[in-house]
Amino acid sequence: MISFNALIGQARSYAVNSVNELWHCDCFFLPRSENYIGGLLAIDVFSRRIYVAKITNKKTNTIKNAFEKIFAEARATPIHLGMDYAGEFVALSGETSGGLMM
């Protein structure tokens, strides 16, 4: 029998000592929504608190505004921000003015 971790890769472990030290984030979209509704999800690894901001596309300014809403709701910014290597977190050429560069 294959364990779940073998199917998805080895789980990572982090040494986190306080709130807002490390957040992980990703985008999601509802598959059957008529208006292409999704969200930016951010999770504080230490407290396991979840923040979500609604988005309608993956354009740089949309993602940037979603992060600003999440930081305002949390009243904090993380020291480290972890994410996958998807394109929504890197400003595309032509969208670099005011874009989110990480």
Image (tube, helix red, strand yellow):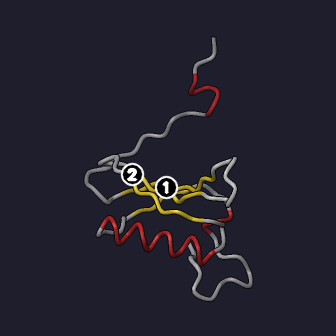
Residue most extreme to the left: 18
Q: Position of residue 44 (x, y in %)?
A: 37, 53
Q: In the image shown, does 91 or 39 lie closer to the viewer?
A: 39
On the image, numbered disc 1 is attached to which residue? 41
Above or below, comparing residue 101 to residue 79 in the picture: below
Whichever of callouts 2 and 1 sits on the residue coming sooner in the sequence is: 1
Q: Quadrant of the C terminus?
A: bottom right
| Residue at (64, 71) in percent of width and height | 90
Cβ atoms under marks 2 and 1 closer than 8 Å: yes
User: Three-letter amino acid code at disc 2?
Assistant: Ile
Q: Which residue is mark 2?
A: 50
Give percent across and percent down for residue 17: 26, 51
Q: Residue furthest right?
A: 93
Closer to us: 59 or 91? 59
Image quadrant where residue 1 sits = top right
Rendered view: 62 above or below 95:
above
Q: Residues within 10 Å of mark 1 (few under 14, many from 20)?
A: some
Residue positioned 29% across, 48% down in the render: 47
Q: Quadrant of residue 6?
A: top right
Provide residue 69's location: percent of width, then percent of height: 42, 71
Q: Position of residue 76 (x, y in %)?
A: 31, 68
Q: Is residue 57 left or right of residue 48?
A: right
Q: CA distance from mark 2 to mark 1?
A: 7 Å
The single residue placed furthest to the top in the displayed view is 1
Residue found farthest to the bottom:
97
